[in-house]
Amino acid sequence: MLNDEKQYHIQLKKGDVGKYVLLPGDPGRCEPIAALFDNPVHVASNREYNTYTGYLDGVKVSVTSTGIGCPSAAIALEELVRVGADTFIRVGTSGHIQPDSVSGELAIISAAIRDEGTSKHYMPIEFPAIADIDLVMAIKRAAEKNKARYRIGITQSKDSFYGQHEPERMGVAADLLNRWKAWEIGGAICSEMEASALFVIASMLRVRAGGVMMVHAKEPMPPLDILLNTSIDALREIIAFDKENGRAVN
Amino acid sequence: MSQLQHHIHLKEGDVGEYVLMPGDPGRAEVIARHFDNAVHVATNREYVTYTGFLDGVKVSVTSTGIGCPSSAIAMEELVRVGAKTFIRVGTSGSIQPGTQSGELAIVTGAIRDEGTSLHYMPADFPAVAHYEVVQALRKAATAKGLAHRVGISQSKDSFYGEVEPEHSGVTQRLLDRWKAWEIGGAICSEMEASTLFIVASMLRVRAGGIMVMHGEGELGSLEPLIETAVLAVRELIKGDQNA
């Protein structure tokens, strides 16, 4: 597929997006995120892929929804890279794994458990799904600026929402419960459904990916403002970092 | 907890919270020369330990021997006697074409191409270095003006499977997988990091690694590698004291 063609699923072509892209799962969350950009414009909507482009500190940035799960997220990442994007921050909500987590705290993702099928079509299972270290540090600075409670660590990227929430009714109940215990012992901090494939594919395409999640624990969830503001400030931080290091931002 | 550990022959107080981990027992003494007032503490099997000071803080070096089985034992027992921060330091192969011998590899994560870490966690759990150790190593390598890459290591169980895959009974698998690691962007190949990272995650301690790579040309002195690792320990000490 030629890079200047409109991409098959996301319906975007070169010039439609900036190098810096936020990736929520929910198409409905693109508009509130884009409202935090300068001069946001709705660029495309197709299937679960909804895209807005605007500016932060004079640099073109975008938000594209991935839909739920690694299969659709992998397509979004592949096609966004083909039209010029090279820096991605996944932003969304997640379950918690550690017993002392509190609803509303942020999970800054350092790496992901590949508990899904998509990334196995890309790399053998032993290959680690690692977030870009410069994005981890940019998100950390942004979380501190927003006075967010946060932790940095590993996420479980799973293929089944209800397998996590109602494991006992599944035909593989014992396996699900044993593995969940393993993730807790291993120190994983959150559970979502897209990060691992994004990180593995980003490694292969030599682009950068990271993620920040708002964790849902026992208490009701607070509004998402601090998550969205942190993701926006994280883009500002990585843009500033790139300018300092002589990396092209447009 | 304070008893003499079975393999490393160390007890509480024998080591600092910060430990450098070479594979080669013979390299422990060379690294210890960079400490102030270094003392040889114990030698048993492949585990050689020296303890000294950096900026007034107690630090140690313990060799792991080759491979994840002996490295896992070293880390488990070192944590039991009080160690909390680990930097693996050693030599490695290179994976990306164009790598020059002497370039440093700062390890962010590791391919679990070995058997030991499967006794700890399912294979889909990532072996990830602690970001504070990664950042300290980058800062140190940058301050010293040394060429370095930041990325993923392949941690393997067979040295000769890597360097002479054609002599193996699983040649095609080894070749196909090596190609995958290259496509995936992995930068270096060694034999201990993945298990150290997995065990560190489970024990809630920090681990990272820095390797000097064999690539094009001759591999020179290991001193720049060792100096960078020692400087990174100083950076971590400074960061911890400010926290």
Image (cartoon, helix red, strand yellow):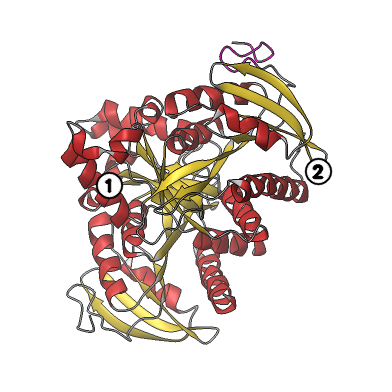
Q: At 55% across and 84% down in the image, what residue appears?
A: B55
Decide: few, some or many residues near mark 2? Use Cα within 10 Å; few <14, some 14-19, many ≥20.
few
User: For the residue labelled by badge 1, is the local secondary structure a helix, a strand or a loop?
Assistant: helix
> What amino acid type is highlighted by mark number 1?
Trp
Alpha carbon of mark 1 to alpha carbon of mark 2: how far?
A: 42 Å
Q: Chain of mark 2?
A: A
Is B195 in front, or is A114? A114
Q: Quadrant of the N terminus of chain A?
A: top right
Q: Chain of mark 1?
A: A
Nearest to N terminus: mark 1 or mark 2: 2
The residue carrying mark 2 is A57
Q: Quadrant of residue A121?
A: top left
Is A247 in front, or is B27? A247
The residue carrying mark 1 is A180
The range drawn in magenta is A2-11
Secondary structure character of the magenta stretch overall: loop
Q: At 51% across and 45% down in the image, what residue appears?
A: A131
